[in-house]
Structure formats: structure tokens, C-alpha cells
Image: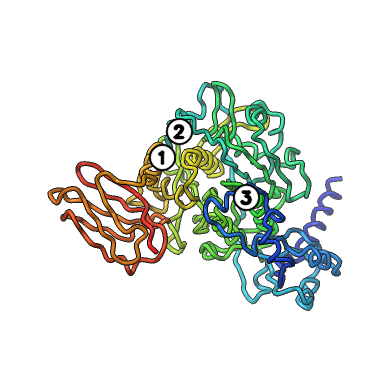
């Protein structure tokens, strides 16, 4: 029997490697103008309202893929359609042979084809060892407040005291599986409050996200946000609402999982989701011809990275684990955490020290990575047996941070996703001296709320800055010329773009060379500080 099983496995492996994978990009969509003019036909009311609140346009990317084109692809010889993406107007297919895919280019509705094996696109890749997410597990004795350290470390307990617990914020969790979430005591509060909104299994194409499919990673990730066991465990956003999407096939590693992820992100956007938590990362695949290299982690190469950036453009705050490659030859942040629009989360231990497994940033990446950190070494989680244990990995620092962000966003409902990210960065322990290990450091969400509230003020008692928005010349008035004041301006990615010591009560700054956009301006003197938003038109 063992011999037969081995032969069967080898045959399956041979067959899977003989197949080819590709994205097929389509030429157009149907009824685009009509759909945009009548957005309720393609989006939920929640999604429409969220976009309107933050001035996010509804565009052609929100229109679904032409189902007639998909039907025609399904009947092509040797072709299996696995996933689709409205944002990219693309379909992910598997062909029995390379030629089965290549001939699709002859179809008049096919714009281009991108093989997962880049050598078929005249480009080769070199594979490294596969490690998507890693868990180091050790059972611990029950004790009250097992999540206390990871909550207090980032100051989200101060938000909870003020009744900011994520209420009204919708989070989509994209992960590998969520067994027992529908029955576990740790999620009873979630179910009783009707905050478990549903979900979908994009791998098996069904609604049963609670079935055990070989992995309970998603259940544990969810617990760090939504878990609640009286006097024993509290997640960082126990009163937020959640959609659960299975996009990761733990039975293997194929690039189609990137497409499942993008499909889920598109579904989240159409449902009006505020935050995506993704404790997943993609670097290498079972078929090494499909794998990425560290140089591909440039914020614009991986399909999932490009999809995550679109999600950010759509107003969703995408929180993603940085990865667990800090101690191996790969080392750097993977996809989609390399995206400039993604809030990438590294890991520290219970004392706030860098966790050696946490993936690091790199100068070749377009923005500071990681963005910030939270506890990921021996973090408290609840497993599918409703037992509180310790797990290690950025898989858990990410949801700890995502839940805290939900609680902050509840307190600052008019803020955009970019503003919320900046408030968190500015509150972090090494905001002025970021590095590739901790990014901007460990956030303080009590301070982040203070920064956000300060920026929301319409009038400033001590400082006058005008005009705002500014085109070229910015006028600054401070109360007295006797007190030197340090001025710093940061862009939305946390990069310092201007610093100046002001020694006069009235100063004019020429900002004509600054790019248009939203900035954070900070004044500091020995008598206090002031921070607020500056818009450069």
C-alpha cells in the first residue's frame, strides 16, 4: 500500500509540474458606463458609502469581468479556469500543456498572457526554499490576561477603556482556514453581536469557511483580533465585524493563490470592508520556474503586490505580515508586504526586542519596510480547540496591529486609510530614526489617537498656517519670536521631506517644489508641540 501511495504521489507530482499556469488578460468589459452610472448594480451600499466618504472614485476596475469571455475560456482545449480579477480584468488558468495556453492569444478578447513560469515570457527566476508562514508552538498554562503584554505594548488598552473596540469597522481576514470559528467559545461574543458577517472559500469555491481543510492558521490569526474569553483573553478589536476569506491552499504552493487573494480583496472592496488583514506571503513555489527572487520584492512585480496596491487605492487599509525570513537567506519582506500601499508588520518579543525571524526591509524597496512592529514572538493566540497557547510569527503581530487600527479608526471615523497609517507611524517608538528591523518601531495607539484628534482641529490656538491647501508660499505665524521652533514635514509614507528651525514669529516657506498630496506638519519647541495636516495642491 505504501508503495502504491508513493507511486500515486509521484504521478500526481509529475502531472502537476507538466501543467502550466498563467494570467490571461482580457481586452474589455461590458456595460462599463452603465455600471459606473448605477454603482449599486456592482457594489454594495456599504462600499458605495465608504468610497464616497473618502472621495474614492468608482471606476472601470469595479466592473466585473465579462462572464461570456470566461465561459469561452472554459471550453478551450486543455484549459481550467481557476480564478478571476476584475481589478486586472484577468483570468488565472491552468493548461495541460504550454501550447494550450499560448493559443488563447488568438482569441479576439484576449489582450495578453503572462505565464507564471517567467522563462516562458523570456525571463527566468531562481528559487529559494519555500516558507510561506511559520509557526513555532508551545502550550502554556492558563492565566488571566494572557494577551495583556501584546495589548499593553502598543497602548490599545487605552482605546478600549474609552470604548473604542472596533465597533462599526469591518475587517476581512484572508488566510488558510477558519475551523471551529462558528462554534468556539472564544468567538461566542462575535457571534452573539452578529459581527461574524460571513465569508467564502476561494480555493474550494464554497461558503463553508469553517470546515477543516488541513490548516487552522486563520482561526488563530482571527483570535488576536476578535477573540474574547472572559478574564483570560481579549483581542485588539473584539467588537469589529469580520468577513473570513480562505485564499491559501495549505496543501501546496502555487501562484494561483495570489489570484485567490486578489479576488478576495475585490470581494472585500465590494462589501465595504475597511481593513484587510493578511498573514500570508508569497516568495517561492513548488515549481521553481514560477518562483520570485528577492530582487522581485520591489513593490511592483508580484501579481498579489499589484493587487494590494489597488486595494489601498480603493481606500482599504491593507495590513500584512512582513514574513518570517529574517533568519534565512531570503531575509527581506515578501509579497504583498513589499507593496508601498501595504502596512507591513514585523515582530518583536515580549520586551519589545527585534524577533530574529522577522523579515527585514531593504533599500531596494520603494518605501520603509517594515512599517511598524508588534509582538510576534510567543504571542498569545487561541487555537481551534479553544485553548490559549503561544505562537511565534509575524502572522500574529499583523492581526494584533490590524485590530488596534480598527479600534483607532472607530475613534477617528473621518480619517482616510493613509491618514490612519500615518498617525500610527508618527506614534511609534523610532519614528524619527526608522530602520530595516523595526521600521518606525512600536506604536503607541493612545498617542496615535491624540495625534489624530489634533490634526482634526479646525483652528489652532498657538499656531497659524495659511493658506491650507497651499500652492506655493506657506505663511507661518507662531506666538513669539523669542522661542525657537523646529518644523518638520512628512509625507504620507512617513518620510521626512522638509525640516527647518523657525526663529521669527512670521515666516514664509516656498513649497513650490513639493509634490502635490497630503503631508503631516509638526511644530516642536521647549514649551510643547503641534501636529496637523497640510495639503499641497
Q: Which residue is mark 1?
A: 449
Whether residue 125 is situated above or below residue 171 in the rendered picture = below
Q: Tell me which corner region of the image, top left, top right, bottom left or bottom right, holds residue 159.
A: top left
What is the x, y in percent for residue 318?
A: 55, 50
Check contact, mark 2 vs mark 1: CB within 8 A. Answer: yes
Residue 457 visible in the picture? yes
Residue 329 visible in the picture? no
Q: Nearer the viewer, mark 1 or mark 3?
A: 3
> Which numbered disc, 2 or 1, marks the residue that appears first in the sequence?
2
Secondary element under disc 1, as helix, strand or loop, is helix
> Which numbered disc, 3 or 2, marks the residue that appears first in the sequence?
3
What is the x, y in percent for residue 361?
A: 45, 56
**Structure colour scheme:** rainbow
Q: Which residue is mark 2?
A: 159
Residue closer to the observer: 452 or 34 = 34
Residue 96 appears left or right of 516: right
Residue 491 appears left or right of 509: right
Q: CA distance from mark 3 to mark 2?
A: 26 Å
Check contact, mark 1 vs mark 3: CB within 8 A. Answer: no
> Which numbered disc, 1 or 3, marks the residue that appears first in the sequence?
3
Residue 89 appears left or right of 471: right
Q: CA distance from mark 1 to mark 3?
A: 25 Å
Q: Nearer the viewer, mark 3 or mark 2?
A: 3
Q: Residues within 10 Å of mark 2 (few under 14, many from 20)?
A: many
Q: Tell me which corner region of the image, top left, top right, bottom left or bottom right, holds residue 498.
A: bottom left
What is the x, y in percent for residue 75?
A: 86, 66
| Residue 47's disc number | 3
The residue sitting at 76% across, 38% down in the picture is: 211
The residue sitting at 74% across, 50% down in the picture is: 203
Q: CA distance from mark 2 to mark 1?
A: 8 Å
Amino acid at each position: 500500500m505504501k508503495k502504491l501511495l508513493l507511486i500515486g504521489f509521484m504521478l500526481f507530482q509529475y502531472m502537476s509540474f507538466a501543467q502550466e499556469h498563467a494570467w490571461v488578460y482580457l481586452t474589455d468589459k461590458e456595460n462599463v458606463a452603465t455600471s459606473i452610472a448605477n454603482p449599486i448594480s456592482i457594489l454594495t451600499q456599504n462600499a458605495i458609502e465608504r468610497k464616497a466618504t473618502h472621495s474614492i472614485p468608482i471606476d472601470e476596475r469595479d466592473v466585473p469581468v465579462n462572464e461570456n469571455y470566461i465561459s469561452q475560456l472554459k471550453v478551450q482545449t486543455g484549459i481550467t479556469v481557476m480564478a478571476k480579477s476584475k481589478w486586472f480584468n484577468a483570468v488565472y488558468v491552468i493548461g495541460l500543456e504550454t501550447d494550450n495556453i499560448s493559443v488563447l492569444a488568438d482569441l479576439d478578447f484576449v489582450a495578453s498572457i503572462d505565464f507564471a513560469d517567467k522563462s516562458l515570457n523570456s525571463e527566468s527566476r531562481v528559487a529559494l526554499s519555500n516558507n510561506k508562514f511559520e509557526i513555532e508552538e508551545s502550550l502554556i498554562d492558563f492565566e488571566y490576561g494572557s494577551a495583556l503584554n501584546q495589548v499593553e505594548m502598543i497602548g490599545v488598552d487605552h482605546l478600549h477603556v474609552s470604548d473604542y473596540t472596533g465597533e462599526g469597522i469591518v475587517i476581512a481576514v484572508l488566510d488558510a482556514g477558519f475551523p471551529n470559528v462558528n462554534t468556539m467559545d472564544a468567538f461566542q461574543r462575535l457571534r452573539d453581536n452578529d459581527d461574524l458577517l460571513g465569508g467564502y472559500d476561494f480555493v474550494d469555491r464554497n461558503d463553508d469557511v469553517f470546515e477543516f481543510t488541513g490548516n487552522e492558521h486563520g482561526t488563530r490569526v482571527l483570535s488576536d483580533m476578535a477573540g474574547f474569553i472572559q478574564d483570560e483573553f481579549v483581542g485588539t478589536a473584539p467588537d469589529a465585524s469580520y468577513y473570513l476569506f480562505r485564499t491559501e491552499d495549505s496543501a501546496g504552493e502555487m501562484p494561483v493563490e495570489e489570484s485567490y487573494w486578489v479576488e478576495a480583496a475585490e470581494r472585500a472592496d465590494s462589501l465595504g470592508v475597511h481593513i484587510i488583514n493578511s498573514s500570508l506571503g508569497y516568495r517561492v513555489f513548488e515549481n521553481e520556474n514560477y518562483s520570485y527572487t528577492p530582487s522581485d520584492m520591489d513593490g511592483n512585480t508580484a501579481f498579489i503586490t499589484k493587487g494590494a496596491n489597488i486595494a489601498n487605492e480603493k481606500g482599504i487599509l491593507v495590513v500584512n505580515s512582513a514574513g518570517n525570513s529574517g533568519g534565512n537567506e531570503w531575509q527581506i519582506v515578501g509579497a504583498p508586504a513589499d507593496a508601498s500601499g501595504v502596512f507591513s508588520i514585523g515582530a518583536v518579543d515580549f520586551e519589545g526586542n527585534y524577533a530574529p525571524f522577522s523579515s527585514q526591509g531593504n533599500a531596494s524597496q520603494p518605501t520603509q519596510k517594515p512599517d511598524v512592529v508588534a509582538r510576534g514572538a510567543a504571542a498569545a493566540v487561541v487555537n481551534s480547540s479553544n485553548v490559549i497557547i503561544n505562537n511565534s510569527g509575524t502572522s500574529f503581530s499583523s492581526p494584533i496591529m490590524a485590530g488596534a487600527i480598527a479600534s483607532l479608526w472607530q475613534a477617528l471615523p473621518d480619517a482616510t486609510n493613509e491618514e490612519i497609517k500615518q498617525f500610527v507611524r508618527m506614534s511609534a517608538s523610532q519614528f524619527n530614526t526608522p530602520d530595516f528591523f523595526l521600521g518606525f518601531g512600536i506604536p503607541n495607539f493612545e498617542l496615535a489617537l491624540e495625534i489624530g484628534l489634533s490634526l482634526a482641529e479646525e483652528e489652532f490656538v498657538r499656531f497659524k498656517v495659511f493658506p491650507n491647501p497651499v500652492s506655493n508660499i506657506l505663511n507661518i505665524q507662531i506666538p513669539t519670536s523669542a522661542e525657537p521652533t523646529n518644523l518638520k514635514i512628512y509625507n504620507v509614507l512617513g518620510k521626512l521631506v522638509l525640516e527647518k528651525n523657525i526663529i521669527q514669529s512670521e515666516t514664509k516657506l516656498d513649497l513650490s517644489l513639493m509634490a502635490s498630496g497630503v503631508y503631516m506638519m509638526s511644530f516642536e519647541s521647549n514649551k510643547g508641540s503641534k501636529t496637523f495636516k497640510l495639503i499641497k495642491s
